[in-house]
Image (spheres, rainbow, N blue to C red):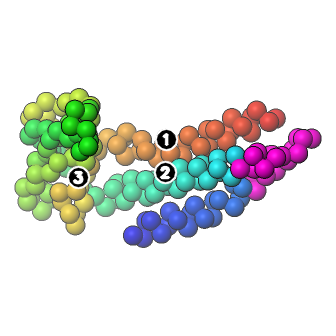
Amino acid sequence: MRYRLRTLLIVMAIGPPVLAVLFLLATQGNEALTLFDWFGVVVATGVGVSLVGVGVWHVFHAVRQIKSWPKVNAVVLRYWITRSEDKPDSQRFYHPVLRFKTIEGHDVTSISPSGYWRKTWQKGDCLFVRYNPQKPRWTEIASVWNLWGVPLVMIGLPVGIAMLELWRRW
């Protein structure tokens, strides 16, 4: 819950300065902005700030994993196959079922929350996972993409678009 509050506070802190910068950029030309233009500025800013907020929350989650979740070896036992509940013929997602020992020595079997469109690992493959010490069945596969992929996209996309817009205006 603390992380959601931090994210909300960060988004509230980022939003007004971003709006101010967009206002300065939008009023640099000689033409006056219409109501439709302002609506676009507000919507784009809201979407961008929301994406950055989600990305910041994922950064906090990634740092929490690195700092406090133990990293252990796990074995792929099999796959749990999921589909969309309302479309039984939709795309299959393969979630690896993992078995590992906690640092206290307890055996844990867990289904990875990450589903893939293909079977990425074979039965018996070893891989590293991080697990929540309070809830050992909450595991995440320890890879750079699983840890930093969402923050990179959620923060990089709006920042990249803003940088392109700045470059276009100068």
The N terminus lies in quadrant: bottom left
Q: Upstream in the sequence, badge 2 or badge 3?
A: 2
Residue type at mark 2? Gly
Q: Calculate the distance from the C-alpha at mark 3 to the C-alpha at mark 1.
A: 22 Å
Q: Say left or right for 140 vs 54.
A: left
Q: Quadrant of residue 127?
A: top left
Residue 83 appears in the picture as rendered: yes
Q: Upstream in the sequence, badge 2 or badge 1?
A: 2
Q: Is residue 52 magenta?
A: no
Q: Calculate the distance from the C-alpha at mark 2 to the C-alpha at mark 3.
A: 20 Å
Position of residue 69 measured from the top left corner of the image (x, y, whole percent): 28, 58
The residue at 76%/32% (across/down) is 168
* Residue placed furthest toward the front: 86
Element at label 1: helix
Position of residue 39 measured from the top left corner of the image (x, y, whole percent): 71, 50
Q: Say left or right for 32 vs 107.
A: right
**Crowd band around label 2 with a 10 angstrom C-alpha radius: few (<14), some (14–19), many (20+):** many
User: Is the residue under label 1 in contact with that under label 2 (CB below 8 Å)?
Assistant: yes
Which residue is tagged 3? 139
**Crowd band around label 1 with a 10 angstrom C-alpha radius: few (<14), some (14–19), many (20+):** some
Position of residue 81 measured from the top left corner of the image (x, y, whole percent): 17, 39
Q: Say left or right for 13 vs 106.
A: right
Q: Identify the main secondary structure in magenta.
A: helix
Element at label 3: strand
Q: Calculate the distance from the C-alpha at mark 2 to the C-alpha at mark 1.
A: 8 Å
The residue at 78%/50% (across/down) is 35
Q: Is residue 21 magenta?
A: yes
User: Above or below — where is 78 with respect to 60?
Assistant: above
Span highlighted in magenta in the image: 20-39
Along the line of sight, the residue nearer the viewer: 111 or 89: 89
Which residue is tagged 2? 55
Residue type at mark 1? Val
